[in-house]
Image (cartoon, rainbow, N blue to C red):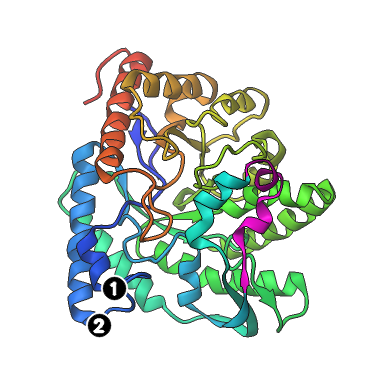
Amino acid sequence: MKHSDDRILTTHVGSIIRPEALLALGSQKSGPPKDPAAYAAALRDGVREVVRKQVAAGIDIVNDGEYGKSSWANYVLERIKGFEVREGRFDPRDWLGRERERFPELVEAEFGQYMKRPVQACVAPIEYHALDVVRRDATNLKDAIAGTAATEGFLTVVAPASAAFNAVDDYYHNEHDYVMALAEALRQEYLEVHKAGLLVQVDDAVLANMYDYLVQKSPRDYRRWAELRIEALVYALRDIPADRIRYHVCFGSWHLPHTVDAPLEEIVDLILQVPAQAYSLEAANPRHEHEWRVWERVRLPPGKILIPGVITHHIVTVEHPQVIADRIVRFARIVGRENVIAGSDCGFAQQETLARVHPKVMWAKFEALAAGARLATAELWGRAAA
């Protein structure tokens, strides 16, 4: 994994708004591809185009936009065996806790179309069975990067804490065994991405999302829950060098007030236990921008990299490049300029049919990110970026 040795590098979290032409051929909304060959060709072309657009916008470390996934986390249920859909429904509002109580109308508006999702139940050994799909995504991305100015490529994978986190365990009947079995299955995907020569980005929103819900019962409940899942992630990553791993933690992409988000200082020790070289964290939205101060008190371990969000999916306002540069410089002054890569708070389409902002706004934000990185480079190195 490259450091920002001679200029501030740029990247993002992963999910990019999908083109309508691709969704029409196969998606959660349109159903499975009726013509697999046509879908495969459209996916391949779509990845090539989204990589081209990332590079044109000034993004150095690129991905496939998650075009081959139905969502940032639940895609994995399409790739592992051992689960079945049960009668009854899971209501995602139930674990919003105090935010739901305080802002019920906003919660309904944000989650209305996603309420009462099917309940998943683990009823058999958990096994990974879709390595061919991972290979497809890796090949599409590597082919798309070839011949471009992209510095590196990454593929996203879901963490054990965030995979099927609300599923019912009717097979292992033991939380530790269930979580570790899930980690062993996910490990197959992690290894496949690594073997393809791409960076492995582990996405873990639920690690932070469960904080308020569980802390209301007892802080010890949250720590116990989280520590088991960090243990599982460490286990799943054990054969991949740290310098090939990025770990992304966010506080949920939804457009709510986020008044009860986990304070970074309460979970940063858990985050740093993950054997990744780079840590991707929210730092641009109004609820978390102040948390750069955490790194004045918590030392970033030697050789590690911070990927702070310096643009956000939470608002449609396109950040001014100078604002972005100021955010980058603030982190660089604390952890070292070579240890900062400019990123985004979260993705722009956590589900394939969901767009957090208009696509043109998203690309304008990416362009502003690159422009801000150039300004930060000029300030930190005393010269313009090449």
Main SS, magenta region, reads: helix
Q: Which residue is mark 1?
A: 26
Residue at the extreme front of the image, as rendered: 105
Q: Which residue is mark 2?
A: 34
Q: Please tell me how crowded label 1 is: few (under 14), some (14-19), or many (20+) other residues with Cα within 10 Å.
A: many
Amino acid type indicated by mark 1: Gly
Amino acid type indicated by mark 2: Lys
Drawn side of residue 265 relative to residue 129, left or right: right
Identify the residue at horizontal 45%, vertical 38% (top origin). 314
Identify the residue at horizontal 50%, vertical 24% (top origin). 331
Closer to the N terminus: mark 1 or mark 2? 1
Q: Can you say which quadrant of the picture contains the C terminus?
A: top left
Asked whether residue 146 appears in the rendered view, the answer is yes
Of the pair 96 and 382, the residue shown nearer to us:
96
Residue 150, percent from left and from top: 24, 45
Q: Can you say which quadrant of the picture contains the N terminus?
A: top left
Q: Is residue 314 magenta?
A: no
Checking the image for residue 230, the label placed there is none
Q: Is residue 102 magenta?
A: yes
Of the pair 68 and 25, the residue shown nearer to us:
25
CB within 8 Å, label 1 to label 2: yes
